[in-house]
Amino acid sequence: MADDDTNFPPVDGPTSGISVSLTAGTLQAIRERVGKRGVSAYLERAAQRQIERDNLDELIADFDKTHGPTDPEAVAAKRAKLTGGASSDAGAAA
C-alpha cells in the first residue's frame, strides 16, 4: 500500500488494494459489463470520471461566485451552436 505521506495525482502512482461495499445489483451490473476480472479497472475509471466531475463542479462554482450564475438561454444557444441543434429547451424536457 502507498505511503500516506506521498501525494499522487489521480491516475498516477502504484495500485493499492482496498475494500469497498456495493449493492448486489450494482456489482452484478458491473460484472455483466466487464466480467469478474474487470471490476477493479471499471471502478478505477469510474472514480477518475467522478473526480473530473467534482473538479469541474468546483470550477463552475468558483466562476459563478465571481461572475454570477449563467444565463440558461445563453447556455442553450451555445450548446446548440456546438452540437448543431436548436437552441430551445425541448431536449431538456425529454
Image (cartoon, grey):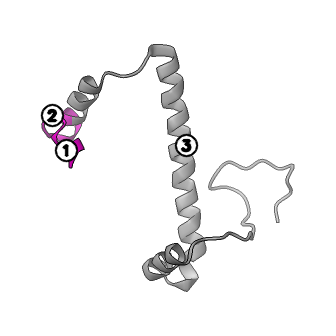
Give the amino acid at mark 3: Asp
In three-dimensional space, the C-alpha distance between marks 3 and 2, rounded to whole angstroms, equals 28 Å
What label sits on residue 88 in the rendered view?
Answer: 2
Q: Up-down: is 74 above or below 85? A: above
Q: Foreground mark, 3 or 2?
A: 2
Q: What element carries label 1?
A: helix
Q: Is residue 1 left or right of residue 80?
A: right
Marks 2/1 in contact by CB < 8 Å: the verdict is yes
Taking the spot 53% from the left edge, 60% from the top edge, the residue there is 46
Q: Foreground mark, 3 or 1?
A: 1
Give the amino acid at mark 1: Gly
**Image position, residue 23 (x, y; %):** 57, 73
Quarter of the picture containing the N terminus is bottom right
In three-dimensional space, the C-alpha distance between marks 3 and 1, rounded to whole angstroms, equals 24 Å
For marks 3 and 2 on the same chain, the one whose residue lies earlier in the sequence = 3
Q: Up-down: is 56 above or below 46? A: above
Disc 3 target residue: 54
Q: In which quarter of the image is residue 55?
A: top right
Q: What element carries label 2?
A: loop
**Image position, residue 77 (x, y; %):** 20, 28
Give the amino acid at mark 2: Ser
Q: Up-down: is 22 above or below 71? A: below
Q: Is mark 3 on a helix, strand or loop?
A: helix
Q: Is residue 16 left or right of residue 32?
A: right
**Image position, residue 62 (x, y; %):** 54, 24
Range of residues picked out in magenta: 80-94
Taking the spot 24% from the left edge, 42% from the top edge, the residue there is 92
Marks 3/2 in contact by CB < 8 Å: the verdict is no
